[in-house]
Image (tube, helix red, strand yellow):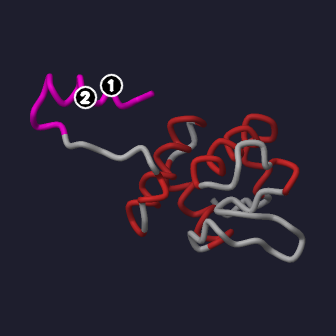
């Protein structure tokens, strides 16, 4: 659980803002910032690249499913649904896919 660590951080520095680790409560620009920064941290690919990929794939709609069954922010194939379809699950599945295929999984050179 991350809660005790956050409490310790907040006690050590009263200016530290309490942040949520529940992406379902994150929306709009906060969602974009949250997802892009998590992907950048996990992959080493800059956040602006992830922002462009997600903007192109789904315009930041985490609930979209296309006619061929690709789902979520990253338009992942249903076979990659290992962590569930929450935003956090989609992030984990996208990290797994990136670790297997790199940016080739998103088939564009326009990044």
| Residue 55: image location, x then y, percent | 58, 69
Specify whether 15 is left or right of 4: left
Q: Nearer the viewer, residue 109 or 101?
A: 101
Q: Residues within 10 Å of mark 1 (few under 14, many from 20)?
A: few
Q: Secondary structure at mark 1?
A: helix
Residue denoted by label 2: 7
Residue 15: in magenta span: yes
Q: Residue at x 61, y 65 (%)?
A: 62
Q: Main secondary structure of the magenta part?
A: helix
Q: What range is drawn magenta here?
A: 1-16
The C terminus lies in quadrant: bottom right
| Residue 8: image location, x then y, percent | 23, 23
Residue 12: in magenta span: yes
Q: Are marks 2 and 1 in contact (CB under 8 Å)?
A: yes
| Residue 18: image location, x then y, percent | 24, 42
The residues bearing labels 2 and 1 have C-alpha atoms spaced at a distance of 5 Å
Residue denoted by label 1: 4
Q: Residue at x 46, y 46 (%)?
A: 37
Q: Secondary structure at mark 2?
A: helix
């Amino acid at each position: 659980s991350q809660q005790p660590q956050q409490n310790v951080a907040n006690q050590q520095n009263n200016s530290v803002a309490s942040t949520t680790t529940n992406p379902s409560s994150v929306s709009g620009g906060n969602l974009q910032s949250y997802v892009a920064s998590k992907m950048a941290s996990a992959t080493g690919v800059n956040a602006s690249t992830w922002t462009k990929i997600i903007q192109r794939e789904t315009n930041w709609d985490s609930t979209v499913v296309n006619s061929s069954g690709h789902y979520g922010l990253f338009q992942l194939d249903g076979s990659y649904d290992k962590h569930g379809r929450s935003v956090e699950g989609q992030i984990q599945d996208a990290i797994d896919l990136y670790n297997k295929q790199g940016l080739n999984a998103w088939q564009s050179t326009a990044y």
